[in-house]
Image (cartoon, helix red, strand yellow):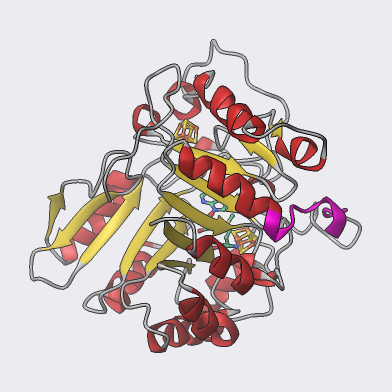
Amino acid sequence: MADSPSVRDLFARPLRDLRVSVTDRCNFRCRYCMPREVFGPGFEFMRTVDLLTIDEIVEVVEAAARLGVQKVRLTGGEPLLRRDITLLVGRLRRIGSLDLAMTTNGVGLTRHAAALAEAGLSRLTVSLDSLDDERFRLMSDTRAGVADVLDGIAAAERAGFTSLKINAVIRADHPDSDILDLADYFRGTGHVLRFIEYMDVGSTNGWRADQVKNADHIAGLIGRHHPLRSLEPNYPGEVARRYQYRDGAGEIGIISSVSKPFCTDCTRARLAADGKLYTCLFATEGTDLRALLRGTRAPGDLERALGGRWRRRDDEYSQTRQDETLPTSSRRIEMSYIGG
Ligand code: SAM
Ligand code: SF4
Ligand code: SF4
């Protein structure tokens, strides 16, 4: 896609990607994201009236596209829980030549994959942490099983999504044999398996540095079984380090947000389901675009608010994470709210 003029932040990083969280609800309770002790029956999720409507989301994305955004990823919570999700995809599809992607836990795909393809979704990422039912349930804390996610992946393939990304969050207690099983399963399928280091997002998952299995370990482990060669990023700001199997069986990615942060190339903004705009996954404060959308405003106000916020951006959390002299924020925003 041709580079469009883009607003730049204080470190000259352009605004290229927008992640849109369409709901803070989820049918899983992944231990690292929405632990049941916190997100239990008494938890107050956003009220429907507080969620941005489709028209409002489209308006924000249009303004973002004028400021240089080329990629939009729908996420959550679980995006397939939002009833009007296919309609939203169809409306966003009409905005220029956007690369339009979605991240999902996959179980809703048997129902929705064909309609999403029809509506014009460009790409799908499916999260699957393990092929072992016991470990999968341990991590996702759901009644769904591995077979439900694999059925969803099969439905996506039938709907014409040929190259999926498969996201697997890896914690230190994840057995190496499990990581290799995932690699073996997806080799040769055309799908790109991406291992994600366990991150300290939010404040409910009780993250500790010693729970991270780092990217070098994962790359070394897989490389010993299936020799790998490093690949160049597809584009500046790509979050995953890319590797190709030397025998031609495809590609994997490793997202090393903790051990090798990539803030210098970070071009992502996030829109929470209630219309707050965040310029970093680890932000504590958002800019309320919903108040603007629902109030009296002049033409161009939304674009000015978005562009103005991006121009003031100086986020580089992951790069300063190790610096213990910096103050740590007490209450970070949860991943299910801000959009993963
Ligand atoms: N529910 C959808 C899903 O799970 O694919 C979309 C939202 S989820 C928040 C987006 C991605 O964030 C998933 O791939 C998930 O595994 C990842 N994620 C959530 N919490 C994480 C954490 N603490 N560290 C690393 N990745 C995390
Ligand atoms: Fe739900 Fe995705 Fe978070 Fe798991 S990672 S609890 S599927 S939002
Ligand atoms: Fe981007 Fe913030 Fe993550 Fe750094 S920590 S890569 S600035 S989202």
Q: Name the residue at 69% across, 28% down.
A: 285
Report the span colored magenta: 44-55
Residue 51 among magenta residues: yes
Q: Name the residue at 75% across, 47% down.
A: 274
In the rendered view, tell whether residue 26 sits above or below residue 186.
Answer: above
In the rendered view, tell whether residue 28 sits above or below residue 259.
Answer: below
Image quarter for ligand 2 equals bottom right
- Which one is nearer the viewer's eye here, 311 or 58? 58
Q: Name the residue at 48% across, 64% down.
A: 93
Which percent across, then down, holds residue 103? 51, 62
Which percent across, then down, holds residue 163? 31, 72
Which percent across, then down, holds residue 71? 42, 51
The reply, left or right, for residue 53 in relation to residue 99 is right
Q: Which residue is farthest top?
A: 325
- Which one is nearer the viewer's eye here, 250 or 63? 63
Labels in figure, total: 0
Q: Which residue is farthest front?
A: 299
Note whether residue 47 is visible.
no
Residue 48 among magenta residues: yes
Note whether residue 157 is visible.
yes
Q: Name the residue at 62% across, 33% down.
A: 300
Q: Which residue is farthest left?
A: 247
Which percent across, then down, holds residue 192? 30, 66
